[in-house]
Amino acid sequence: MDSQSPLEVALTSDLRGSPYSFSLWDVHTGTQLVVFKGNKNNPISKCLRLIDNNYFVTAIDNVIQIWSIFNRKSQEQKLFLPNRPSSLLVSPCGNYLIAGIAEMIYVWQFCSGNLLAHTQRHYQTVNVLRINQDGTFLFSGADDGMVLVWPFGDLISNTHTTGSLKVDKSSSDIGVNEPRFTWQHHDAKVTDIHVSNGGRCVTCSIDKTVNIYSYANGERLHCISNWPSPIWSMAMNKNETKLFLGAQDGNIYELLVSSLSLSMMHSHPDSDETRRPLLTGHKDRVTHLSISMDGSLLISGSLDSTCKVWDIYQSKLIRDVKHQAPIANLVTTIVPEAFALTSMTQSQNKPPFLAKQLRRNLYKMPRDICISQDDIFDESTTTLYFIKNKYDVYPKVSSSVSEVSTKADLGPRESDLENPSLVNDLKEKLKQMYVLSTEKIFKEAASESLRPIKRVKKVK
């Protein structure tokens, strides 16, 4: 077998803490590969998240620690939070850290340490944070039974879009963090949230209900109630047809999402077949569920101090991985197979994850900021840019804009496309035109402190 082939592993932590903080084990064999040592205090549940599959971040009391999976050591940065967090989340691009601390939501940028946003719209502790795959919407669930949907770009820029994107002042409020949708259909603590790739959001609670929403328009599509036991965790298969529910009684139930009728809002699993658990074996609350990369295995973590691996297609238990204390965190990732066979001399050469000290004061963008044109085309969907130096940009591209518009009217010629220098020149001019359009969109939405500063002519 190729030593560089991928190996799927599970990273878990239990409430025992010291002397072994985290354990990395093979999902398909159950073999323990690595143990991470170094924490004296107990880990916090739902406070372990991966960063680009090379690092993971965790919280011990009010201290954030970043670990390298490959050299098995904690990074030098220890980031101090205002208080003990109840949930952690890392954005898909790996640039932002989101933390739920009591009723507050905090958003930091790793590379700068800046606190980009902090807001309080929940009335009780925020215990669930999720974000969709492209990083455009943040979902928060709390003990108050509410689920809030935040446009992530508005959240980190302290703006609130009240309608469709327009250039008039009535479409945006500055310095206001408000959720796009507020869902208050649960009667008790929200325990888990799943965000699908198809624009749906599934929430569960200890009130024995599961709600399915469309986060595009905020509409509740289904409410499946009267489950035999409170639901504490969820996982959905790859084609998003089945939803697995981890319950307080230690059983795992199955919900066929594909069979739900769009015309029926409320569904009650009254039949014995629906109420019957799909997988049984845990002796206590199932707090974590995860699907393997190939979609054939379901990994569950419970307060009975075990992680179990199930065959989804045959609905049977494959292996049981025992721990010394109740499971606090469970995530799955991919590592090279050489990870378990060598001393990892090559992996130790990986550069450290660069993160600065987290600040407690809300970051305000300086008035004299100047951003290069290359940064405008950053692929991260959760980054907003405010172009302040338009007086430097306009003179340089005014003539090129007219040239590009003229060529666009005539259409490209085959001879032009064969000339690499001309093609590159056209691409650069299109970039410059995009800079101008970006400035026009955000000009009216920016506050007085973010508007361009007019130049004052020097008196000779």
Image (spheres, rainbow, N blue to C red):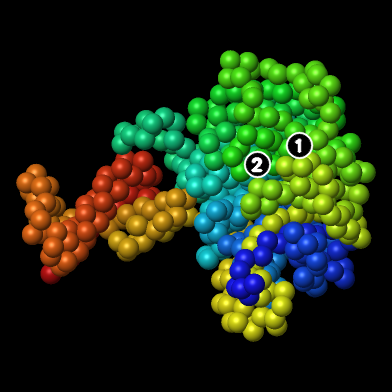
Residue at (56% x, 56% y) in the render: 96
Q: Residue under label 2, please give it.
A: 237
Q: Residue under label 1, please give it.
A: 245
Percent across and percent down for residue 242 are: 67, 35
- The circle on residue 41 is none
Corner quadrant of residue 396:
bottom left
Furthest residue in direction top, as rendered? 263
Which part of the image, by quadrant, shows the N terminus?
Answer: bottom right
Which of pointers 2 and 1 lies earlier in the amino acid sequence? Answer: 2
> Camera-side residue: 321 or 177?
321
Residue at (66% x, 40% y) in the render: 236
Residue at (76% x, 37% y) in the render: 245
Residue at (78% x, 59% y) in the render: 12
> Camera-side residue: 441 or 46?
46
The kind of residue on which mark 2 rests is Asn
Corner quadrant of residue 258:
top right
- Left or right of residue 100: residue 286: right
- Left or right of residue 373: residue 99: right
Q: Are marks 2 and 1 in contact (CB under 8 Å)?
A: no
Note whether residue 187 is visible: no
- Using a 10 Å C-alpha cutoff, classify the residue at mark 1 as few (fewer than 14 neighbours), some (14 to 19) or many (20 or more): many
Note whether residue 25 is visible: yes
The kind of residue on which mark 1 rests is Leu
Q: Secondary structure at mark 1?
A: strand
> Camera-side residue: 293 or 218?
293
439 is higher (above) or lower (below) than 151? below
